[in-house]
Image: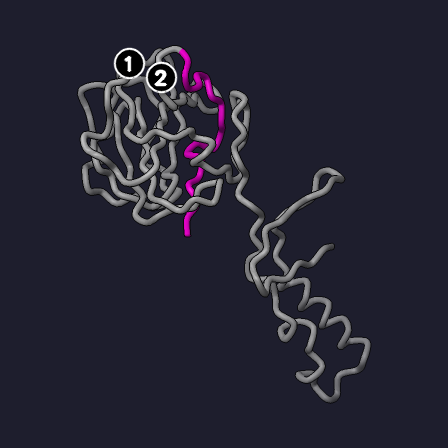
């Protein structure tokens, strides 16, 4: 099951929710690493449900399947993006894969510098996509705080605006099984000298281990493990 990933590689939130033009909403603006235009990646595999070109080229993307929220909730998610200057390659019904660079920062609509306006909503897309709030701005229906929807995945956090986004837990992928690397004596060639056996075994083990994380600071770490997974510490 997918987890919705924060859609920019560099997080620099320049306007949070409940402030400025985001009053009475859970909208955030992310301007990326610098003033340049950066790609916006699909947080999940989904379908474009609505495009609104008369304002800030808003695009609504609905998840194809339920996703896992940071609090463990499983539900569909809809995310609204705004300000891409050119969305001529997008259309309602277009399928987008998770991590696909389908949108960009920009200044379309009422924007002063290149950024992407992001709003998250719990559940499937609801017509007409947004509603006018008490401050007069239009916001996604069923809005939810972005840090309660999106996960960081090696995201370069420059400014999180004080929001505590959760990191996707370290996943132990394809850890070699006992039979593959440890119980190798049964497959030994009969004429191999004992010293070489040991060397071969070490090389095999090294080749099959996959680096998933390099510890940069001595500390306590928690990892999420599924039944049957194994951890090798080097
Ligand atoms: Zn905004």
Secondary structure character of the magenta stretch overall: loop
Q: Is mark 1 within 8 Å of ligand 1?
A: no
Residue 234: x and y in percent read 74, 55
Residue 117: x and y in percent read 36, 23
Instruction: Give the answer, above or below, for where 229 lies relative to 161.
Output: below
Q: Earlier in the sequence, mark 1 or mark 2?
A: 2
Residue 120 or 214: which is nearer the viewer?
A: 120
Residue 19: x and y in percent read 41, 13
2 left or right of 157 in image: left
Which residue lies under the disc numbered 1? 134
Q: Residue at x 55, y 24 (%)?
A: 158
Q: Real-space Cα distance between discs 1 and 2?
A: 7 Å
Residue 5 or 70: which is nearer the viewer?
A: 70
Q: Determine which of the numbered discs, if any, sits on residue 39 in the image.
A: none
Q: Residue at x 34, y 46 (%)?
A: 45
Which residue lies under the disc numbered 2? 24
- Give the residue at the far right of this rendering: 195
Residue 188: name its quadrant: bottom right
Taking the magenta stretch, the answer to whether it contains residue 115 is no
Instruction: Give the answer, above or below, for where 96 lies relative to 104.
Output: below
Q: What kind of element bears circle 1? A: loop
Q: Residue at x 62, y 49 (%)?
A: 223
Q: Which residues are magenta?
A: 1-19
Whether pointer 1 and pointer 2 mark residues with C-beta atoms closer than 8 Å, the reply is yes
Q: What kind of element bears circle 2? A: loop
Residue 145 or 84: which is nearer the viewer?
A: 145
Residue 205: name its quadrant: bottom right
């Amino acid at each position: 099951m997918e987890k919705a990933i924060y859609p920019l590689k560099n997080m620099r939130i320049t306007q949070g929710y409940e402030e400025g033009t985001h009053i009475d909403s859970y909208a955030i603006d992310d301007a990326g690493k610098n003033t340049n235009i950066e790609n916006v990646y699909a947080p999940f595999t989904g379908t474009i449900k609505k495009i609104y070109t008369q304002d800030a080229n808003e695009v609504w993307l609905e998840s194809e399947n339920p996703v896992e929220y940071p609090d463990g909730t499983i539900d569909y998610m809809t995310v609204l993006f705004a300000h891409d200057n050119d969305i001529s390659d997008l259309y309602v019904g277009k399928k987008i894969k998770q991590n696909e660079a389908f949108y960009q920062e920009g200044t379309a609509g009422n924007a002063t510098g290149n950024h992407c306006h992001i709003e998250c909503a719990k559940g499937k897309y609801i017509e007409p996509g947004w509603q006018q709030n008490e401050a007069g701005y239009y916001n996604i229906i069923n809005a939810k705080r972005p840090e309660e929807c999106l996960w960081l995945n090696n995201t370069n956090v420059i400014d999180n605006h004080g929001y505590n986004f959760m990191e996707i837990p370290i996943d132990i992928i394809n850890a070699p099984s006992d039979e593959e690397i440890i119980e190798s004596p049964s497959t030994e060639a009969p004429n191999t000298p004992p010293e070489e056996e040991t060397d071969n075994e070490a090389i095999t083990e090294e080749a099959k281990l996959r680096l998933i994380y390099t510890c940069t600071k001595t500390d306590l770490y928690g990892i999420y493990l599924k039944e049957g997974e194994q951890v090798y510490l080097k």
